[in-house]
Image (spheres, coloured by chain):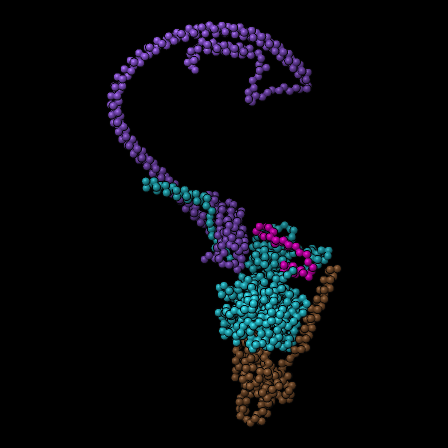
Amino acid sequence: MYLKKILTLFILAILTFLTACTSISDNSGDAVVEDRTGNSAEEGYEGQTGAYNDSDMGQELGVTESMDIDAMSAATNAKAQSSLLVQTIYFDYDRITINAQGQAALNTHAEFLSLNPDKILVIEGHTDEQGTREYNLALGERRSMSVADFLMASGIPREQLEIRSYGEENPKLLNHNEAAWQVNRRVELLY
Amino acid sequence: MLNWIRENSIAFTFAVFFHLLLFSLLFASMPEDKADNIVFKKGDIVQVTAINMNNYMAEVNKIKQQKATEKRQHEALQRKKIADKKKKKEALKKAQQEKKRKQVEKKKAEKKKAEAKRKKEAKRKKEAKRKKEAKRKKEAKRKKAEKKKALEAEKKRKIEKKRQAEEKRKAEKQRKANAEHQAELKRQSAQDEAIREIRSKGVVKRYVALIQQKIERNWRQPLGSPKRLECKIEIVLATNGRVTSVEVIKSSGNLSFDRSVENAVRRASPLPVPTDLFIFKKFEVMRLLFDPGRF
Amino acid sequence: MYRIKLNILLISYVCLLASSQVFAVLDVEIRGGFQSASPIAIAPFSWTQSGAIPVDIASVIRSDLARSGVFSPLENNQLPERPTMTSSINWSRWKSTQAENLVVGQVARNKQGNFIVEFKLLDIYTGKTSIEYRYNVKSKHLRRVAHQISDKIYQQLMHTKGAFDTLIAYVVVNNNINANKRVYTLAVADSDGYAEQIILRSKKPIMSPAWSPDGQKLAYVSFEKNRSVVYIQQLKSGQRKIVAQYKGINSAPDWSPDGKRLAMTLSKDGNSEIYILHIASGVLQRITNHHAIDTAASWSPDGRSLVFTSDRAGKPQIYQITVNQQGRVGKAKRVTYLGSYNAGASFSPDGKSLILVTRNKGGFRVGRLDLNTRKTQLLTLSHLDESPTFSPNGKMVLYATELRGRGILEAISVNSNHAPQRLRVLSGDVREPAWSPYRSR
């Protein structure tokens, strides 16, 4: 009799355990899917992407700074949307400083954000796999903060920025070499 | 006591003679009664006649006969006893008469003695005086002679001393010579001993090295043992080198290490030991100190 | 006179010599020898019933002892005979195998359907039985019995408690190049990697599993909400609760030895700092206050200090800080000075050393720092080793590494330079191992 009680309790426990697990995973599946291919960015700007070439952005921006404001805002909008394609800022190993290319890209975001105060930019930091995971989680956050600082210095209020870090947990490339590591050391900019 | 015997010699001799007579009489009547008067000495085995049932009648007759003879003997003895008693009485009478006679004689003799004594005494005194004189004269002479002697003795003594001294010296020399000789012998034997020791030391050294090597080859220490461990064990070897006992006399404090030491010796058994029993004796009990981290 | 004295001396010397030689005990010093794993023979356990034996107990024991790094078990084909609990043993044959100990055993089934497992540990040199035990268990506990036998053997021969009857927690990822298709699993298995059970399954990363001292709960970091959040989950019921979901990072949970507090890394106040959460009351206490990154705190076994990783000196290094019961915090003191990168430190169960990840010649290795000598000894050989975790007896270290592009777990003995033993890996990349405390019955 005693044995039966234990058995039933045990079976109940296993059942709850299984349901708990599955329910958890279901929740995570439903709530959290986030598309990283930039669809969210495209939502607001359908049909308007793709006109400009990424790589020349920085220099052109520099040139257009002297234009008049209206033209500038229209131009900026157009450019902003194209610069929004620049969703990733890359970093050197163990560095949180933003290089020139990154700075240029961030400037376009800064402009976009200032023109769209309702928009919140999610700044997601990542690292390569070298070193420990806990430290990399913090390092990723540092990179995000570095980007946020840069944007705040450009006048963007803190409330428009959300800082996150995935550390080394979400690599873009899975190889264990410098080429992959370079690509993984990044900050992703999402709206 | 002897004086008393001398003075009462008659009585004494009479008494002795009487006693001897008694005893001889007694013993004279003995020989026929051996069967009744067995003197037991220590260790005498008393013969017991066993009765054989088959010869019962014969035995019974035997006994009957024995009893008859015994009776006869007893009667004869009784007769003898009466005769003896008579004889004794007569002897006693005679003895008493004798005693009386002797006593009278004794008194007479005593009187005579006393007289003789007195005379003797007088003579002695005279003699004594004369002797004294002679003595005095002698003494004087003697003393003179003594002095002479003394001087001579002195001389002699001196000579003796010298002689003795000489002899001592001689003896000393001898002794020294002997001692040296002994020492030489001892040195010789010591040298021999030493040589034997050195030779055996060489053997000992060689076997100690062999034993060390064999044990080290078989000593698996536990991995990661702390460096400065030391363990001392005492082992007993049989003549064939087999380890018959292992005892830890100083633990390293690390049980695994101690056990590894015991195992090393067990695995290495039998150990190489010299075949010469005298040298093997040195190896019979060994103390091994295991200290790998010392250097 | 001189002559006499000399003679006396000589004679007495000879006498002394003679006597010393006759009565002396030879004193010999043994300095050599070699260090190696203890050779042991484990004969297959006899199984009297029909069919295959449900668990090859001898095989589990053999792999446990091999994994410890301090035993070298014989292979089955090296055994001169297959003795059982009752057979007579030909000791001379065993002595020539170089093995020092022999394990024999048997498994039988009784009328109730339970299993009776018996074993004996024998000393090959003396032929004596060192230990002998008997177990009566259900079929599902057979593997655990095998681990408990390994523990008994380990304890008897190494004079230290064994840690084979323990669990390990770890994270598995089926690393798909497409991040959307990745599945993360938090799992718990036996110390040899068998009998895996899934604790949490998610499409988002899971990190830092940490065992409660009573072995009943796991704290971990999950990215289900698209950011790092710390959970505590009851293993038996599967129930869990969130303990930290502040703004920014919530990570690196570590239980205090009394199980009442949780050290964590939070960046809610603008920077990555160490905090202590009093679990029952929910009170949060800040420990570090420095603009540098402070993370990965780990409690000392006496519960009086924490070691953590900080880059306040430029690069990550290990620091130690005292925390008393009342909550008074001391000054952070630097512990590691050698090397350009030292991180992820945790204490050995005896509190005398730390294991950590250190950069060496461009690669990341697991090292052991002796707190007394302050010297670091490298324990692993490859270049992407991380997440070291001590066995509860402090004799083995489990860590994650990479083999042919795949994440695997390896175990090494702290004492030996024996090769690391790979843990059984089913599929996917395995990482972030955490060794459980001793199991209660």
* Quadrant of the snapshot with the C terminus of chain C: bottom right
Residue B3 placement, left or right of C140: left
Q: Say if B175 sits above or below A181 in the image.
A: above
Whether A106 is among the magenta residues is no
Residue range corresponding to the magenta coloring: C119-148
Percent position (x, y) of residue C294?
54, 73
Residue situated furthest right in the rendering: A1
Residue at the location (52% across, 78% down)?
A95
* Residue C59 vertical placement versus A136 (above, below): above
Q: Is residue C170 above or below residue C75?
A: below
In the picture, the quarter occupied by the N terminus of chain C is top left
Residue beneath the point at 56% across and 79% down? A144
**In the foreground, B67 or A138:** A138
Given residues A101 and C228, the one toward you in this image is C228
Residue B213 visible, this angle:
no
Residue at left 35%, top 42%?
C6
The answer to if C124 sits in the magenta stretch is yes
Residue drawn where x is 48% and y is 53% of the image: C30
Q: Which chain is cyan?
A: C
Colour seen for chain A: brown
Q: To which quarter of the image does residue A107 belong?
A: bottom right
Residue C105 lies in what quarter of the image?
A: bottom right
Question: Would residue A156 be found to the left or right of residue C110 on screen?
Answer: left
Q: Residue B269 location in percent, x, y?
A: 53, 50
Q: Which chain is purple?
A: B
